[in-house]
Image (spheres, grey):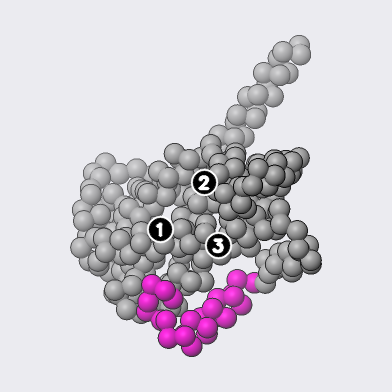
């Protein structure tokens, strides 16, 4: 009797998880399905169909030939790479300082720093826009990159992870004459590699999906990112009627992120768990 109850419980759990998976994955399926539908076929469907008998890849060709989506992908790659590198260079020493270095008012400063997370993003965007504009950095990669080179959340995540490493290890390293920089780069970072990799992946995803800031700070197509490209398709009148081509563009620029996440998913979960657990 007990085994039957356990079996029924497992069936219910898997059923609920399967339903949840279908709900989560259905938008992606719909995106791919729409992207391979012919323009005429899509418009002729008064009731949307869940399959197509005649898939086509022409929409993907149209998406890349209508606007310079390939160049926008290159711009996004450059923006993402530079921003992520700078973010790691800034946040890692900051997290180390808050976790290991002793200075007066450290907890107060960190508390005030964490309070920045309570400020609505809209206010930060407005402030950054005014600052970058006054500095004459609109329509530049510098203007795109600078507001994204640091993150309170990533510093907090790294700090909590660094504090899981026994402090005796730090003291022993100092006794051996190891500098703080060497201890950080040769001891802490290798030990906390899952969290560091997690932050890098999350930052890449954040930069690749960035929409509001590029739309505000750039109106020169030389600096457009993929988010600008999708909007340009729509504003040119192409995407308002040819939804399949627009979905093809969205699907194409989503593939790198999906592959990246699938490849590093285990390390991401491990890093998040380690970063949120002390002791």
Q: For the residues marked 1 and 3, what is the alpha-carbon distance in whole angstroms?
A: 14 Å
- Give the x, y percent position of residue 236: 29, 74
- Tell me whether the residue at label 3 lies in contact with that at label 2, contact meaning CB atoms closer than 8 angstroms: no
The residue at 60%/31% (across/down) is 15
- Residue 119 sits in which quadrant? bottom right
225 up-or-down from 97: above or below: below
- Secondary element at tag 3: helix
Q: Inspect this view and state whether residue 230 appears.
A: no
The residue at 48%/40% (across/down) is 264
- Residue 279 sits in which quadrant? top right
Q: Which residues are magenta?
A: 120-143
Is residue 196 left or right of 257 when viewed as pictured? right
Is residue 129 left or right of 141 when viewed as pictured? right
- Tell me whether the residue at label 1 lies in contact with that at label 3, contact meaning CB atoms closer than 8 angstroms: no
Residue 226 versus residue 23: which sits nearer the camera? Answer: 226
Q: Residue furthest bottom?
A: 134
162 up-or-down from 91: above or below: above
Q: Residues within 10 Å of mark 2 (few under 14, many from 20)?
A: some
**Nearer-N-terminus badge (2/1):** 1
- Which residue is denoted by mark 3 in the rendering? 90
- Which residue is denoted by mark 1 in the rendering? 81
């Amino acid at each position: 009797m007990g085994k039957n109850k356990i079996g029924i419980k497992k069936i219910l759990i898997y059923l609920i998880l399967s339903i949840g998976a279908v709900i989560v994955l259905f938008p992606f399926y719909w995106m791919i399905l729409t992207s391979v539908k012919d323009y005429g076929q899509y418009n002729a469907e008064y009731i949307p169909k869940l399959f197509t008998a005649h898939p086509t890849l022409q929409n993907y060709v149209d998406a890349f030939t209508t606007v310079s989506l390939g160049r926008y992908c290159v711009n996004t790659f450059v923006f993402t790479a530079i921003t992520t590198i700078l973010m790691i260079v800034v946040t890692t020493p900051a997290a180390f300082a808050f976790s290991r270095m002793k200075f007066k008012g450290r907890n107060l400063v960190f508390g005030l720093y964490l309070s920045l997370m309570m400020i609505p993003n809209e206010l930060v965007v407005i402030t950054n826009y005014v600052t970058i504009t006054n500095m004459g950095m609109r329509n530049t990669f510098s203007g795109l990159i600078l507001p994204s080179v640091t993150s309170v959340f990533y510093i907090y995540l790294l700090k909590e992870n660094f504090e899981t490493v026994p402090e005796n290890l730090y003291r022993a390293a100092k006794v051996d004459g190891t500098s703080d920089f060497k201890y950080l780069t040769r001891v802490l970072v290798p030990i906390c590699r899952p969290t560091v990799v997690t932050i890098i992946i999350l930052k890449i995803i954040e930069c690749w999906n960035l929409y509001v800031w590029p739309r505000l700070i750039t109106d020169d197509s030389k600096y457009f990112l993929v988010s600008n490209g999708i909007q340009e398709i729509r504003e040119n009148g192409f995407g308002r009627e040819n939804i399949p081509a627009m979905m093809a563009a969205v699907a194409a620029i989503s593939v790198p992120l999906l592959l990246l996440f699938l490849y590093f998913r285990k390390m991401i979960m491990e890093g998040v768990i380690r970063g949120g657990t002390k002791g």
